[in-house]
Amino acid sequence: MKKRFLALVLAVLMTAALCACGGGKSPAAQPTDTPNGSAGEKALGGEITVGIAADLDTSLDPHVSSSSAGTREVLFNIYEGLLKPDTDGNLIPAIAEDYTVNETADTYTYKLRDGVRFHNGKTVTVGDVVYSLTRAAGLETGEPLVAELKGIASVEAPDDKTVVVKLKAPDAEFNAYMYASIIPEGSDPAAEAVGTGPFRFVSRTPQDNVVLEKFADYWGEGAILDKVTLKVIPDGQTMVMSLRSGAIDMAERLSSSQIADLNELTILEGSSNIIQALYLNNDFEPFRDIRVRQALCYAIDKHAVIDLAADGHGIPVGSSMISSMGKYVVPELVDYYKPDVEKAKALLKEAGYEKLSFSITVPSSMPAHVDAAQVIVEQLRAAGIDASINLVEWATWYDETYKGRKFEATVVGMDTHSLAASGCLARFQSENSKNFINFSNADYDETYLKALATVDEAEQTALFKQCETILTEQAANVYIQDAASFVAMQKDVGGYQFYPALYIMDLSTMYRVK
Amino acid sequence: MQYVVKKTGVLIATLLLVSLFAFLAFEIIPGDPTTMLLGSDYTPERAEALRESMGLNRNVFARYLSWLAAFLRGDMGTSYSYAMPVHEVLRGKLGVTAVLSVMSWVLVTALSLPLGVALVRYQNKPFGKIGVSVNQILMAVPPFFLGILLTYLFGLLLKAFTPGKFIPFEESVPRCLGYLFFPALAISIPKAAKTVKLLRNAILSEMKRDYVLTAYSHGNSRWMVIKHHVFRNALLPVVTYLAMSLADIVASSIIVEQVFVVPGLGRLLVASISNRDYPVALCIVVMIASVVVVMNYLADILTQTIDPRVRLS
């Protein structure tokens, strides 16, 4: 009896294994022999599966999800603002058809586009726009949900096609924040995600997937694909395996080591639009001394960090400005501090910190930063500085390092929410809530505020550049690079577009090759 | 009977303690659920208001007691991260992990019993000698690593399945089981190797007992002695071990799920801990602890039932 039972169990298991052999073969064999994705012909419709490294945030409220860039880049497909960025780094009209700015740059007038619909079928009205901006700017509660909008004094709709935004103080860059999503009047986006974007939200399964579908009534060209499934795959090696097996069609923000195994796929290289740096807590006793901070800058060779930790992919930076922000970038700052171990030692001696030791806090889920931190530790050792790496979970990093500012140094990447220079620079004002490095410099604060209030573009750009220069001269942080990002796609998928400056995944242009 | 009552009491006390410790552990680790919910821009007042509304400002024991009371009524609370009832977050995932665990357990049993006996039967043949060494090695391989090996071998080289493309039950039951077969194999190989070793040793030590001599004197061959007399006695420690190993299997399936992108409890547990989503994490921890404790309990009762010598009182 026992024997027969065992035989039965074995037989069942064998059959299960054989079924798997039959079932799995066809999808896995497919990617190798199809034509090149970028050159192939677009097919209308179809669906793709995209691997994402982290599940989306709790709430899909576009006004509060400012915490995670991964959520924002998905919401970009669901929501739109009055204006939206394009791939050349310009702002193009979206829900607004046109806009005018008064001479003093404190009143912005937007004219609504006709026939823009929400995913629930309703047409966008001025009421929706006023509701959305009032909510995002916190005009009723006094607390802006989108920090960049705190300069709004009032939002009014003089007629049913026009919205007038009045600012508390002149801000020539204000349009850059008008990506703020428009949602239906009176709606709670935390409960249901309704926007006007080319895709509509269908469903999500925690820690597994998010499903988006094409929005047929989109006002513009709209999406090519009918359906996109975003699959959550937090483990980097598993992501590579899933790309190789064909289980997912695309993944972005891969590292150079991840793409090494993906020869059979289309690989695109672009910038991830984050400033990776050894961010220093300027309030940590030794780092209060500018000489110590400068010593660190001399001790660290950013080019070597990029070569060793990122296989040479990445754009070296010298200040807090994303490298694709064109006119705002100051190239001279990149090599402001030439690697010089002796100079570093001399500066430390002068400051009285010959035996400097500190810890570098790094979120363990971010291999690119962990790798960079390891190279940095070795370089610092050569200059006689004893740095140690303290790996923490993301939640702990966020809570203690970022919010609590209880750290000595940390290696992470900072992104920007807007196409305005202020997106990169606002956080270094002394009193800014995001100034987690406790940088405090009166000169910087003054120059920054002056830049914001300047209407003349050339003059304003010069002032922002001056801010960047102050950050570098003051050695606020040890700047490393604008990190590279790789996108891997199966050969039968095309249409991925990189956006300058912003952290965006535009699914509307993606397609299947016929 | 008294034994069962006593054991049941210990079982309940253990479960209560486990849930209390899990609750306290989440108090101690740094990180606050409210900061994860509020994003990067918020005022202390808003955080305070949220803490108040989530009931996080109450005494930890008061919170534990109200959690326990709700849990016993079947109300597992609301997930912080997903703003939905915990049972809805767990729906589907629990089944996947359960099927994977049971499948692995069946594989362990099906592989280890015949192999364990065979290793004794061919003890002095090359098969037996090589088998023991290979078994020793397999025992030491972590399931996570085996999972990576299996995905490369069966997934990428032999294309027996598509790694990362899990097929849900609703779509096709045989194909779902076909996919789960590979993670189950990764989980069960080291476990089976341990069981084989245990069974082999048990049989060999039984062989030295007096009744074996008697059996030989009746004219039985060695194989007949093993088959009819020794096997059943040697099975006793193995049964206990197998019953208890189900708990271990649940734990390793949580790790192996990550390698095979199986949407089970594993990733949810990891994510809920790093997002400080305590209601979900606590629920999973308590469920796993329950499996461990209940399996231990059943193993105790089972041994007692099988072997009259263990029967106490």
Image (cartoon, coloured by chain):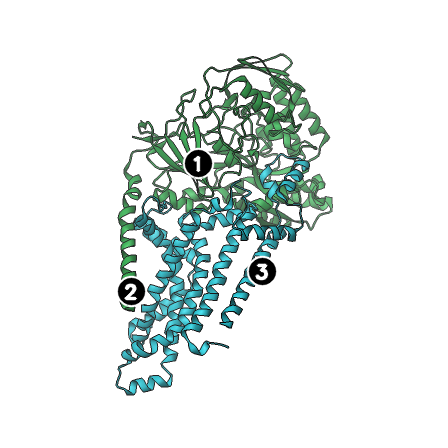
Which chain is in cyan here? B
Residue of label 1: A203
Q: Is residue B279 left or right of residue A475?
A: left
Count of numbered circles on the image:
3
C-alpha separation, residue under disc 3 versus residue under disc 1: 38 Å
Q: Is residue A62 visible?
A: yes
**Rendered residue at 37%/76% (across/down):** B233
Residue of label 3: B17
Residue A478: name its quadrant: top right
Tell me, yes or no, whether the two marked residues, 3 and 2, touch with CB atoms within 8 Å: no
* Residue A317's disc number: none
Which residue type does callout 1 highlight? Ser
Residue of label 2: A5
Q: Please tell me whether mark 1 sits on a helix, a strand or a loop.
A: strand
C-alpha separation, residue under disc 2 versus residue under disc 1: 43 Å
Q: Is residue A507 left or right of residue A152?
A: left
Residue A166 x, y percent position in the rendering? 63, 17
Q: Is residue A467 left or right of residue B172?
A: right
